Image (cartoon, rainbow, N blue to C red):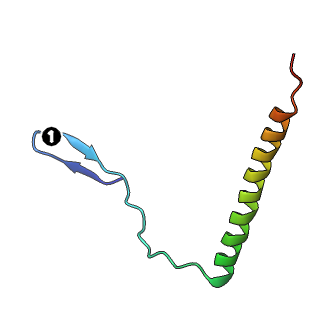
Amino acid sequence: MPYTTEDGGRVNNFANEPKVYKAEPPTDSEKRNYLILGVVSALLVAGGIAIAFYASANAPVS
């Protein structure tokens, strides 16, 4: 571990720095997959909201 000693004898322990890398832009197939996942998730959310409205509209009144 990298230790440094300051004035007065105090020892500091520094964390190892992670490797830095440049992010790659998404490929065409990754962009297509992101679009498909977005559409599927939007349909799931819309379906959940529709079920909630249907269930609340048809709930028996006591």
In percent of the image, x 22 and y 51: which residue is there? 4
In percent of the image, x 58 and y 78: which residue is there? 26
Residue closer to the observer: 7 or 26 = 26
x then y, percent, for residue 24: 51, 78
Which amino acid type is marked by label 1? Gly
Q: Identify the residue under disc 1.
A: 9
x then y, percent, for residue 1: 36, 53
Q: Secondary structure at mark 1?
A: loop
Q: Quadrant of residue 17?
A: bottom left
* Above/below status of 41 relative to 5: below
Number of numbered discs overlaid on the protein picture: 1
x then y, percent, for residue 36: 73, 70
Q: Quadrant of residue 8?
A: top left
Left/right placement of residue 60 relative to residue 26 reads right
x then y, percent, for residue 47: 80, 51
Q: Residues within 10 Å of mark 1 (few under 14, many from 20)?
A: few
Residue closer to the observer: 61 or 19 = 61
Q: Quadrant of residue 60?
A: top right
The quadrant of the picture occupied by the C terminus is top right
* Above/below status of 20 relative to 13: below
